[in-house]
Image (cartoon, coloured by chain):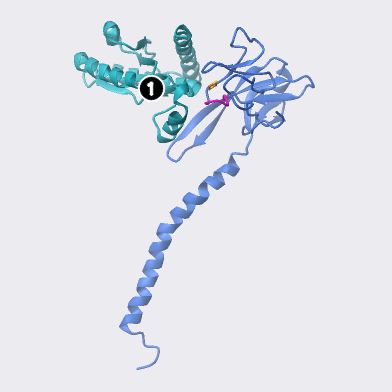
Chain colours: A cyan, B blue
């Protein structure tokens, strides 16, 4: 499900079946790594969108977590806040999906599952190729999700 | 002077009605279009879309067939890729099933559950459907998978808009 009012209607009706929240991590930077940040955000947004289409009955795709790439301490606080908030509701699984290696360092401090994927620069890619690359990545991501779900049963 | 002389009051009345009418029309037209547009769109949706699947290559084993079309939302025009599971049934008839689970809308796939290799499986809450798309009782889905109407043109499979499964 997406963060839209109609999907939230569905969520409230079917709560017991929706046990997973997904937070796409969207870095912003105006420094020398501006383009890199944009490409990460683009990639992760695309990926999580496709993922939602596959698993929309079991997960809520939250609006992305936007943060300044050079301010990881503050961003970490923000993420922890999200985790606390989401833990209160019945989300048994919280997945953070990112292409930013910075988060790997903080993995220990997070209670949710951190999924890191190397961002693939899509800008010069031929349309068909792009689609198949994303599809591949989505498949891998799906496997990870299915695995985590199975583990917890 | 003459009876035809337009009084000040009448003049104002005429002009205001005229202008008001224009304004009302200006406001109403888009509203009418809003109301009518979805109707127009629905009739467009009846079209069949070409897949890349050759009809003579369809076997009795369900395979994934993708087809892409442009979808117009209120603000966005986007390329949407849809998937169908296509095979020939015992009578040799082509069957094209929608992969959207009838429970909460996840995407099902053929044989992805190792315990049920000849069923459609939904990974979200372990819904199962037999090959003809009928839901297996006792699993969460409450109805059978939708069916795409199809056409054959120049040996290529064309798919229409998914419809609810009839015989179930
Ligand atoms: S969405 Fe398919 S079983 Fe729940």
Q: Report the predominant secondary structure element of the magenta stretch.
A: loop
| A79 lies above or below B29 | above
Along the line of sight, which residue is nearer the eye, A49 or A36? A49
Crowd rating for badge 1 (residues with CA inside 10 Å; few <14, some 14–19, many 20+): many
- Mark 1 highlights which residue? A45
Q: Is residue A28 visible?
A: no
Q: Quadrant of residue A20?
A: top left
Q: Please say whether residue B102 is one of the residues in the magenta stretch.
A: yes
Along the line of sight, which residue is nearer the eye, B53 or A101? A101
Q: Which residues are magenta?
A: B100-104
* Position of residue A138 measured from the top left corner of the image (x, y, whole percent): 47, 15
* Position of residue B42 measured from the top left corner of the image (x, y, whole percent): 57, 42
Chain of the residue on which disc 1 is drawn: A
Q: Residue furthest bottom?
A: B1
Q: Please say whether residue A38 is one of the residues in the magenta stretch.
A: no
Name the quarter where the C terminus of chain B is drawn: top right
* Position of residue B112 measured from the top left corner of the image (x, y, whole percent): 59, 11
| A2 horizontally vs B87: left or right | left
The residue drawn where x is 21% and y is 19% is A31
Disc 1 secondary structure class: helix
The residue drawn where x is 38% and y is 22% is A45
């Amino acid at each position: 499900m997406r963060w839209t009012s109609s999907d939230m209607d569905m969520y409230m009706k079917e709560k017991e079946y929706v046990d997973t929240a997904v937070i796409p991590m969207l870095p912003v930077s105006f420094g020398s790594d501006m383009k890199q940040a944009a490409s990460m955000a683009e990639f992760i947004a695309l990926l999580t969108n496709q993922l939602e289409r596959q698993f929309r009955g079991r997960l809520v795709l939250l609006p992305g977590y936007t943060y300044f790439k050079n301010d990881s301490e503050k961003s970490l606080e923000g993420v922890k806040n999200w985790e606390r908030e989401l833990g209160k509701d019945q989300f048994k699984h919280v997945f953070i999906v990112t292409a930013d290696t910075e988060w790997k360092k903080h993995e220990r401090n997070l209670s949710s599952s951190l999924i890191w994927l190397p961002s693939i620069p899509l800008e010069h890619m031929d349309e068909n190729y792009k689609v198949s690359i994303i599809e591949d990545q989505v498949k891998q991501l799906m496997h990870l999700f299915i695995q985590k779900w199975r583990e917890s049963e | 002077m003459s009876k035809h002389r337009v009084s000040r009051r009448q003049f104002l009345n005429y002009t205001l009605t005229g202008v008001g009418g224009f304004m009302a029309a200006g406001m109403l037209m888009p509203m009418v279009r809003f109301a009518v547009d979805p109707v127009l769109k629905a009739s467009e949706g009846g079209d069949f879309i070409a897949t890349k699947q050759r009809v003579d290559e369809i076997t009795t084993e369900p395979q994934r067939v993708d087809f892409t079309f442009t979808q117009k939302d209120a603000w966005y025009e986007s390329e949407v890729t849809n998937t169908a599971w296509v095979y020939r049934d015992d009578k040799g008839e082509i069957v094209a099933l929608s992969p959207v689970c009838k429970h909460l809308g996840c995407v099902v796939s053929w044989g992805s559950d190792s315990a049920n290799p000849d069923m459609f499986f939904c990974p979200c809450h372990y819904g199962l459907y037999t090959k003809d798309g009928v839901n297996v009782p006792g699993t969460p889905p409450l109805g059978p998978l939708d069916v795409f109407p199809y056409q054959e043109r120049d040996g290529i499979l064309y798919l229409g808009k998914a419809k609810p499964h009839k015989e179930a």
